[in-house]
């Protein structure tokens, strides 16, 4: 799972769905996390990395 912060410049890996955190420490907003947990579609949380948005360099390093 991936999430995009508002502004859409960088994509992060959604590591922990309980608190919405990424490996780099960035967190998704509580509202977006509640939308995701309720089963509704969120434009900011996606299952595949958007091809036009780069992955956060810190998340990428943590995945290696």
Image (cartoon, helix red, strand yellow):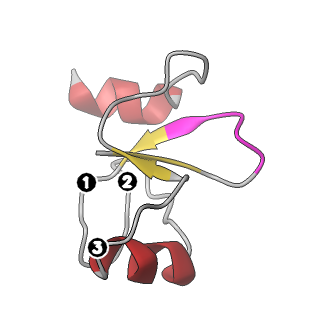
Counting labels gives 3
Q: Are marks 1 and 2 in contact (CB under 8 Å)?
A: yes
Residue 1 sits in which quadrant?
top left
Q: Badge 3 is on which residue?
A: 39
Q: Residue at x 42, y 62 (%)?
A: 41
- Asked if residue 40 lies left or right of residue 52, the reply is left
Residue at screen point 24% across, 64% down: 16
Q: Which residues are magenta?
A: 7-11
The answer to which of marks 1 and 3 sits earlier in the sequence is 1
Give the quarter of the image for residue 6.
bottom right
Q: Label 3: few (<14), some or many (≥20) within 10 Å?
A: few
Question: Residue 8: horizontal and vertical position, in percent?
Answer: 70, 40
Mark 3 secondary-structure assignment: loop
Q: Residue at x 38, y 71 (%)?
A: 40
* Residue at mark 1: 15
Q: Which mark is residue 22?
A: 2
Q: Residue furthest top?
A: 51
């Amino acid at each position: 799972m991936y999430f995009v912060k508002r502004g859409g410049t960088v994509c992060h890996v959604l590591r922990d769905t309980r608190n919405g955190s990424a490996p780099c420490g960035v967190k998704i907003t509580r509202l977006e996390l509640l939308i995701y947990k309720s089963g509704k579609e969120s434009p900011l949380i996606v299952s595949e990395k958007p091809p036009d948005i780069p992955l956060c360099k810190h998340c990428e390093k943590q995945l290696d």
